Image (tube, helix red, strand yellow):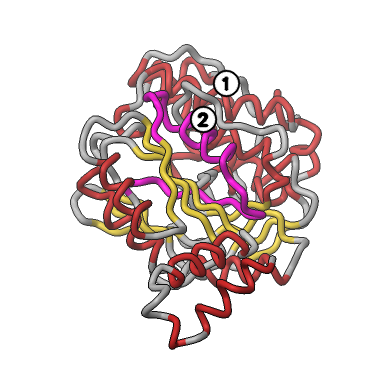
């Protein structure tokens, strides 16, 4: 401690700066290491050299000192790894680890293992966040220990330069099932527009080798929630469609995995669905029914989804805010069965 005090005294004495020019660096490093690490920002990276700079710059400009940025280079074969090294050299908050390519989930899991923060958030390397997004979110979670997950707004940049807001509303959910059904969390079960408390990830990792991994993971995280889930219209996560990305090139097996994730939820929440308003349960079932139709008609995935009454105890076709085509599909599935419906569409 005496040595640290000496360094600090030198740093504060202008007459010593010429004799000890490196003490500026020493003190800055010491300050960084001693700062309480509040937020770990985890970025899986693979062959995105054209977009990575925008992503990292948007994070660096958030005005957060007590954070770490963990860049996981998942075996990139372009210049992405070099860009990560440059950022790690010039900004003490940025750290890079290089690993053999093993997919998005494995890269996120590596970041989680390295993370020192009390809070986690994830940003995909071809996306970016609006200025002033993260700091207010962190401050809100610091001020309210009961918030386990804080979800913020999304702007989707669709191929063709169209922009579609997701429209996350201001809400608080003490009942986690209400968040899933009434808050329609199943439709935005992304890992990347949320800030999580560390303990929510106890015993949870992303499933390696699966596409649509967030749909598999969010229900497990919600099961660990001890407080509230809060959604806010503040801030913006800019999701940029990538024609070469994982989702755009999903295989038949990937679509089956997505379908199975939702069916697992239906199977494990039958009693809860009987307590939820039928209109919200119907909307969720219609969502899963559309996934089944797409998986079967385009990718020849077998019909795995049962009728709504097998999960919720009854059908709800003419309630909720479903579109007219969704109501027709629900009605047909009710009368003729899900399998025949998928054969006709």
Q: Which residue lies furthest to the front in this view?
A: 19
Q: What element carries label 2?
A: helix
Left or right, residue 241 beside residue 266: left
> Does residue 319 lie above or below 264 as drawn?
below
Q: Quarter of the image containing the N terminus?
A: bottom right
Please state which of residues 46 and 236 is positioned toward the viewer in this rendering.
46
Label annotation for residue 305: 1
Residue 202 position, x and y percent, is 72, 38
**Residue 333 placement: quadrant:** top right
Residue at x 56%, y 31% (from the top left corner): 206
Residue 281 position, x and y percent, is 66, 41
> Does residue 285 lie above or below 209 as drawn?
below
Q: Quarter of the image containing the C terminus?
A: top left
Q: What's drawn in magenta, residue-wise? A: 98-126
Q: Do the residues labelled 2 and 1 touch (CB within 8 Å)?
A: yes
Q: Mark 2 points at which residue?
A: 289
Left or right, residue 324 beside residue 4: left
Residue 61 position, x and y percent, is 39, 68
């Amino acid at each position: 401690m005496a040595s640290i005090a000496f360094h600090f005294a030198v740093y504060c004495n202008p007459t010593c700066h010429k004799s000890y020019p490196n003490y500026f660096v020493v003190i800055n490093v010491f300050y960084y290491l001693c700062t309480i690490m509040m937020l770990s920002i985890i970025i899986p990276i693979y062959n995105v050299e054209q977009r990575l700079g925008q992503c990292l710059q948007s994070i660096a400009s958030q005005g957060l000192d007590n954070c770490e940025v963990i860049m996981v280079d998942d075996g990139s074969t372009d210049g992405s790894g070099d860009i990560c090294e440059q950022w790690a050299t010039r900004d003490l908050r940025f750290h890079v680890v290089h690993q053999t390519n093993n997919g998005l989930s494995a890269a996120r899991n590596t970041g989680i293992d390295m993370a020192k923060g009390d809070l986690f958030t994830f940003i995909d390397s071809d996306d970016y966040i609006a200025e002033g997004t993260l700091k207010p979110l962190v401050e809100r979670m610091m001020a309210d220990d009961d918030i386990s997950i804080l979800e913020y707004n999304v702007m989707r940049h669709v191929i063709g330069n169209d922009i579609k807001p997701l429209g996350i509303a201001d809400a608080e959910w003490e009942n986690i099932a209400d968040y899933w059904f009434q808050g329609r969390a199943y439709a935005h079960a992304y890992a990347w527009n949320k800030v999580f408390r560390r303990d929510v990830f106890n015993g949870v990792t992303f499933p390696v080798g699966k596409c649509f991994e967030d749909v598999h993971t969010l229900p497990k995280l919600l099961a660990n929630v001890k407080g509230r889930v809060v959604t806010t219209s503040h801030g913006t996560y800019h999701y940029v469609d990538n024609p070469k990305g994982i989702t755009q090139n999903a295989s038949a097996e990937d679509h089956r995995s997505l379908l199975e994730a939702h069916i697992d939820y239906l199977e494990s929440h039958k009693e809860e669905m009987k307590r939820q308003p039928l209109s919200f349960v119907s909307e969720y079932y219609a969502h899963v029914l559309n996934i089944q139709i797409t998986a079967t008609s385009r990718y020849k995935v077998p019909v795995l989804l049962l009728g709504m009454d097998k999960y919720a105890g009854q059908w709800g076709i003419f309630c909720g805010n479903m579109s007219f085509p969704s109501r027709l599909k629900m009605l047909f599935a009710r009368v003729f069965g899900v399998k025949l419906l998928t054969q006709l569409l």
